[in-house]
Image (tube, grey):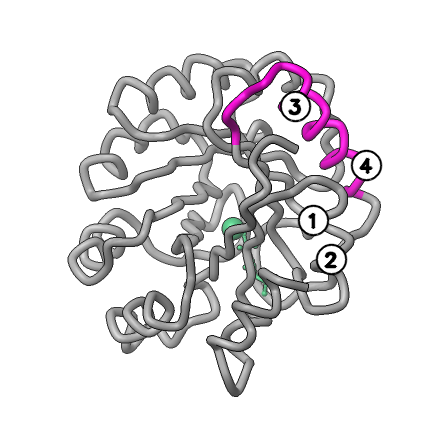
Amino acid sequence: MKDTVIKIAPSILSADFSKMGDEVMDLEKKGADIIHVDVMDGVFVQNITFGMKMVKDIRKVTSLPLDVHLMIVEPWKYVEKFAEAGADIITVHYEACKERLEETLKLIKRTGKKCGFVINPDTPVEPVQNLVSMCDMVLVMSVFPGKGGQKFIPEVLPKVEKFRKIIDEQGLDVDLEIDGGVNFDNASLIKRSGANVLVAGNTVFTADDRALAISRLKNL
Ligand code: DX5
Ligand code: ZN
């Protein structure tokens, strides 16, 4: 693996929304590398979270990269708006734009932001493998998207290995992120499979000591 630096990206889905600014500042203070921002539209997934305004407002309180995970239909309609709001990385689901994924990734690129695709636990690598080289990030879901605190699905790990192989064989500068159910028991296995960015909602937010939780996830 070319880039062995492990980054932890706490998901603000598990934060107290009534004090989001403080939560984000606290994560930065406690050693988070990236802030993972879960945008849900109530259509692509059942839940509704927040939109561009949240990105714009938390942009003011942190210098950490904002990793915006769009769980929305027709994401091409919104990527420019999220870019303007201050996202650094924008990822879109293959399942939400099967025929237009490449076009949508190019659209994100044109905004000057980093781009990536996300695949659900039951989506194979094959339909998207040729697009890895145009991405800055590849996100493998290890739960079905829609809510935090779900159980990790270990069957997705062979896909992580496949993406790692593609990235390394082609010498690409692409982050490989995993999202859903990451905890102290599976972090080490996930890293061995080749992921270098670990999203963690529940594990960080339920910890008594968030700094310790982040450093354990990073160093386990
Ligand atoms: C799921 C979201 C994830 C998730 C992570 O739809 O994309 O970011 O909330 O939370 P945990 O770590 O609690 O599974
Ligand atoms: Zn997410």
Q: Which residue matches tag 1? A: 191
Residue 171 in magenta? yes
Sequence order check: which comes first, mark 2 or mark 4?
Answer: 4
Q: What element carries label 2?
A: helix
Q: Position of residue 124 (x, y in %)?
A: 75, 27
Q: Spatial distance from mark 3 to mark 2, Cα to Cα?
A: 20 Å
Q: Residues within 10 Å of mark 1 (few under 14, many from 20)?
A: many
Q: Which residue matches tag 2? A: 188
Which amino acid type is marked by label 4? Pro
Query: Do the CB atoms of the residues marked 2 and 4 lie less than 8 Å apart?
Result: no
Q: Spatial distance from mark 2 to mark 4, Cα to Cα?
A: 15 Å
Residue 26 in magenta? no
Q: What element carries label 1?
A: helix
Q: Which residue matches tag 4? A: 158
Image point 44% across, 52% down: which residue? 38
Q: What element carries label 3?
A: helix
Q: Which residue matches tag 3? A: 168
Q: Residues within 10 Å of mark 3 (few under 14, many from 20)?
A: some
Which amino acid type is marked by label 3? Asp
Q: In this view, does 34 lie to the left or right of 150?
A: left
Query: Do the CB atoms of the residues marked 4 and 1 lie less than 8 Å apart?
Result: no
Image point 47% across, 61% down: which residue? 10
Image point 62% across, 46% down: which residue? 178
Q: What element carries label 4?
A: helix
Sequence order check: which comes first, mark 3 or mark 2?
Answer: 3
Sequence order check: which comes first, mark 3 or mark 1?
Answer: 3
Which residues fall within the magenta stretch?
156-174
Q: Spatial distance from mark 4 to mark 3, Cα to Cα?
A: 15 Å
Q: Is residue 123 above or below residue 24?
A: above
